[in-house]
Structures are given as C-alpha cells and as structure tokens.
Amino acid sequence: MIITRRLEFDAGHRIPDHRSLCRHLHGHRYAIEVTVSGDVTRMDGDPRNGMVLDFSEIKSLVRELIVDVWDHAFLVYEGDRIVRAMLDTLPDHRTVVLDVVPTAENLAAKAYEILAPHINALCDKALTLENVRIFETPNCWADAARPR
C-alpha cells in the first residue's frame, strides 16, 4: 500500500546561472509530498489498525526535518558567494546553505536524502520512502523517487 502526506512552506531562492527571471532573488509557496509504502496493519486494538502509518507521523517527521528548517528561509547555493555575503549581513536571517543549486529537482533530491534514513524509525514495521515531490508552483514540480 502507498500513502502520501502533503505539507506547504514558503522560501526564497535564486538560480544563479538561469537565463531568465529565476536568476533574481524571489520566493515560492512550495509544497512537499512524501510518499511511503508498507503493509497495512491488521490488528484489533492497534492504533494503526487499517493503516500503513498514521498521516500525522509522516507530518511530524517532514515538519521537523524539512519544513521547520526551510520555511521562511532563503535557500542559497554554497557557490553563490555574492548572495551568501549579502545574506550574512542580515542579523538573525534564516538562511539555509545548500551544496546544490536550489532548483525543484535538487530540493526534491535533498529532501529525499534527508528523510530516507528516518522513515523506518517511525514504527516497528518495514516502511519504504517511495517518493518526495517538491512543487515549486502549482504547475511545476520535481520527483525524487526510490532507486529501483
């Protein structure tokens, strides 16, 4: 069985080498969808009876590891020295320095990398992180899928 939990957050970024408007500082209302697979629990008296996992458990993990870190932050590539220097002048600014350019594709891959080691710790049965989808806009997204 496969289940998905969606959360939203706001963040700024720029794509330094982009040939159009995305090379400028700007922000998005991002959405992240995390898809997990596992067996449905079938045990009377178990709070997960009928579920792969309680959606709130996925929500808590994604909020702690991704949303609370990236929300209302500026996601900046470590190689974007000019913008990093500017952000460093802002006291108490929420800046997340990434080792990749903050495209939707790279953010999805980074979120997958961060979340994957923590999925099985959510409960005492085998779960698999199948996919992380990052929506940069309602019409544009990237998926980081489990390697096959």
Image (spheres, rainbow, N blue to C red):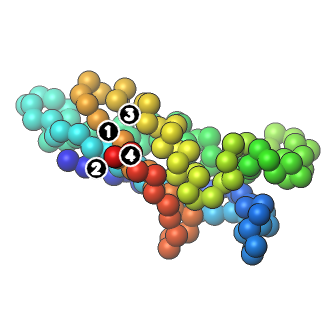
Above or below 127: residue 25: below
Residue depicted at x 37% and y 26%:
121
The residue indicated by pointer 1 is 128
Q: Could you tell me how far apart the alpha carbons at marks 1 and 4 are, in whole angstroms?
A: 8 Å
Residue linked to disc 3: 119
The local secondary structure at tag 3 comes to helix
Q: Is residue 56 visible?
A: no
User: Residue at image x 23%, y 39%?
Assistant: 38
Task: Give me the C-alpha separation between circle 3 and circle 4.
Answer: 13 Å
* Residue 34 place in picture, x, y as percent: 40, 49
Q: Label 4 amino acid? A: Arg
Residue at 62 percent of width and 41 percent of height: 69
Mark 3 or 4, nearer chain start: 3
Q: What residue does disc 4 label?
A: 146
**Which structural element holds mark 1?**
strand
Q: Nearer the viewer, residue 10 or 124?
A: 124
Please state the horizontal and vertical placement of residue 33, each as a whole percent of the image.
Answer: 43, 54
Label 2: few (<14), some or many (≥20) within 10 Å? some
- Tell me the kind of residue under disc 2: Ile
How far separated are the C-alphas under marks 1 and 2?
11 Å
Residue under the image location 44 percent in, 30 percent down: 117
Q: Is disc 3 surrounded by few (<14), some (14 to 19) or many (20+) residues within 10 Å?
A: some
**Residue 3 disc label:** 2
